[in-house]
Image: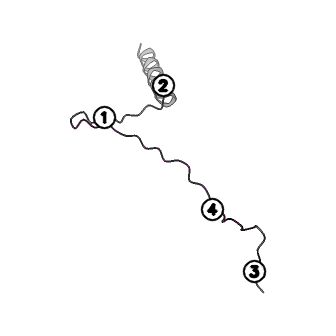
Amino acid sequence: MKRLFAFVMTMLLGATLAFGQATGGSTDKADTTSGKKATKTKKGHKGGKKSKKGASDTSTTPPPK
């Protein structure tokens, strides 16, 4: 009986976590006392080095001696 209970609880926990991950579940709640809604901010992937216009891959500086 204990094994069945442990199995059921494990499956319930796994299903809860999978459902939360699939739906992007967030535990942030809106502050209802001030009337403001909680805002979600997602940080995007920052780009790498960007070259200036007119710059080319070939370098015009001489190699070090």
Q: For mark 1, does the 10 Å Cα neighbourhood hold few (<14), some (14 to 19), or many (20 or more) residues?
A: few
Circle 2 is placed at which residue position? Answer: 19
Q: Marks 1 and 2, Cα distance to the nearest angstrom?
A: 21 Å
Left or right of 36? Residue 19 is right
Q: For mark 3, does the 10 Å Cα neighbourhood hold few (<14), some (14 to 19), or many (20 or more) residues?
A: few
Q: Marks 2 and 4, Cα distance to the nearest angstrom?
A: 37 Å
Q: Marks 2 and 3, Cα distance to the nearest angstrom?
A: 57 Å
- Mark 3 is on which residue type? Thr
Disc on the earlier residue, 4 or 1? 1
- Secondary structure of the residue carrying numbered label 4: loop
Disc on the earlier residue, 3 or 1? 1
Q: Quadrant of the C terminus?
A: bottom right
Q: Which residue is drawn at the image coordinates 44% and 21% (left, top)?
A: 12
Left or right of 63? Residue 47 is left
- Residue 10 placed where, x, y %? 46, 23
Q: Marks 1 and 2: CB-CB under 8 Å?
A: no
Circle 4 is placed at which residue position? Answer: 49
Q: Marks 3 and 1: CB-CB under 8 Å?
A: no
Disc on the earlier residue, 2 or 3? 2
Circle 3 is placed at which residue position? Answer: 61
- Mark 1 is on which residue type? Ala
Q: For mark 2, does the 10 Å Cα neighbourhood hold few (<14), some (14 to 19), or many (20 or more) residues?
A: few
Q: Tell me the quarter of the picture where residue 4 sits.
A: top left
Query: 65 or 38, which lies in front?
Result: 38
- Residue 28 placed where, x, y %? 35, 36
Circle 1 is placed at which residue position? Answer: 30
Magenta segment, prevailing SS (helix, strand or loop): loop
